[in-house]
Every structure is written in structure tokens, then in C-alpha cells.
Image (tube, helix red, strand yellow):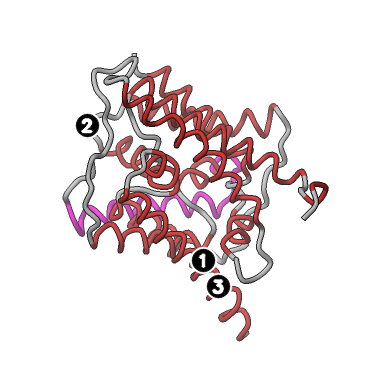
Amino acid sequence: MSATALPEAFITPLLGGLTLGAAAMWLLFSLGRVAGISGILWGGMAGPDRHWRVFFLMGLLIGGVVIHAVLGMPVPAQSSTPLPLVVFSGLLVGFGTRMGGGCTSGHGVCGIGRQSLRSIVATATFMVTGVLTVFMIRHIVEGAL
Amino acid sequence: MTSWPALLSGLLFGMGLSLSGMTDPAKVQGFLDITGAWVPDLAFVMGGALMITLMMTSAILRRGKPLLASAFNVPNLNTIDRRLIIGSAIFGIGWGLSGFCPGPALLSLIYGYKTTFIFCIAMIAGMFGATLFNPRPHP
């Protein structure tokens, strides 16, 4: 591929990724905590150490507002997944991230950054089942309809 | 004392997520659709984030203690057990079904869509379900 084939579409994802990494590193540097969202959400609701997590989650929402409302990044369209499937998906995501101890951020960004074998295995596992699930939906279920 | 650093980290995290495209579930499903019309953009999200965390994590941990807290609170488990694999596998299936993972789903609440709201309620219910299933808390 030539250099001109690299579309601008790659720039905001890269900037976003770098910013996510910086956010995680600041949290580790300042408070010594892992920026894993499933864990922060859970601890923010049920943990003994709720305070910082609630502030983190407030910041997360404000960060979204800054990018979309202040800087004018377009808001993505609403998911077209049927509602019963959305409910099932949410149940699995909540259950699975608690059982597996993390999600895309905790295992994928922070854990791999720490070179934790557990997180590498977890990330490989959810990437594979995520890919297989989309394959089933798009190429088997929808193909059969 | 822990509020402003956490707020700042969350703010950056939310900005990163919104910039990255991860809050667009159709795009996430496109990224996972490697045998179809693959949308490769989101590989740059993980790549960019890991560039930073792989470079900086060990240097930060070597400092011995964080700037504004008494000790690092980082998981030090090393066991690859069934819980880790099965839990992560279940999470991946849920992620593929809708294209939502926890951070982007929570952030998308600001878009005011019904689907996101329903997803988040179901996700929280799933989290409580997991503790009924196995009450051992995570670090």
C-alpha cells in the first residue's frame, strides 16, 4: 500500500488510543489505580472505595461531551441491534467482565501494558469470541435469512 | 484528595473513547468482522493505547508509590484459571452481539439513545448476576 492509501480515518482512532493510554497512565501515576471501566463501574456501585471511581465516571461522561459538543465530533448513530439482543448482550458483558475480572480497558489496555499474562490471555480470548460472534451473526445467521 | 486526579483521568479517558470511534457500535462490529467488510481503524485505538501503556507502566511502577496515594493498587495475580477464560469468552460474545463494551456503553449514555440505556441496565444486572454466581470479589 502506498502512503496515500492511509486515509485520515486512521488519525482520530490513533489520537483516541493515545489519549486512552495517557488517561490510564495518569491514573496509575497519581492514584496507583488501574483504569478498567468494568471494575471502576462495579466498585463505584458496590465497592468500599467508591469516591474516586464516581469522579472517574463523571469525568468519562464530561470527556464525551467535550469531544462531541465542544469540539464538534459527530455523534455515532444509534445501534441497530434488536432490543432483545441488546439486553442479552448487556447481560453477557456485565457477567463476563466480572467473572473474567476485566474488559477491553482493564485487561486490554492496562493489563497488557503491565505485561500481565492473565490480561494477555483474557484479551486474546474476548477478541476471538467477539470475532466468532460477529462472524456467526453476519455470515451465518444473516446469510441464512 | 483523590477526586480531581480521578476526574482528570476519566475526562481524558472519555475524550479518548469519543475520539477513537469506539462509541460507535456498528464500527466496533465492523472491526470484529475480519472475514467480511473489515473496518481496520479501531486497531489503531488499541495500538495507540498500548504504545503508551507498554512504554510507561513499568517506569511508573518502579517509582514504588503513586504521587497521591500510599501504595499501588494493581492486580498481581498470575493464575490462568477457568474463571478468567470463561468470563472473558462470555464478555467477547456479548461484545460481538451488540458492539458495546463497558466504557463506550457508559459514555454513550450522553447520546440519549434508548438502546444504550437498556444495554447499561442489562450490563449492571449481569454484574450483579456474576457476584451471585461466585461471590469472591476481584481485587
Measured as percent of width and height from the top left, residue B113 is found at: 59, 49
Q: Residues within 10 Å of mark 3 (few under 14, many from 20)?
A: many
Q: Front-most of B117 and B79? A: B79
Q: Is residue B77 above or below residue A58?
A: below
Where does label 3 land, which residue? A135
**Range covered by the magenta-colored residues:** B109-135
Main secondary structure along the magenta-highlighted residues: helix
Measured as percent of width and height from the top left, residue A90 is found at: 43, 57
Label 2 resides on the chain identified as A
Closest to the camera, between mark 2 and mark 3, is 3
Label 3 secondary element: helix
Residue at the spot 33% in from the left edge and 15% down from the top edge: B68
Label 3 resides on the chain identified as A
Separation of marks 2 and 1 at Cα, in angstroms: 36 Å
| Residue at the right extreme of this rendering | A4
Q: Is residue B93 above or below residue A35?
A: below
Asked if residue B117 lies in the magenta stretch, the reply is yes
Label 1 secondary element: helix
Q: Tell me which amino acid carries mark 2.
A: Pro
Q: Residues within 10 Å of mark 2 (few under 14, many from 20)?
A: few
Label 1 resides on the chain identified as A
Residue at the spot 45% in from the left edge and 42% down from the top edge: A109
Separation of marks 2 and 3 at Cα, in angstroms: 40 Å
Measured as percent of width and height from the top left, residue B96 is found at: 50, 63
| Residue at the bottom extreme of this rendering | A144
Q: Is residue B47 above or below residue A64?
A: below
Where does label 1 land, which residue? A131
Residue A62: quarter of image: top right
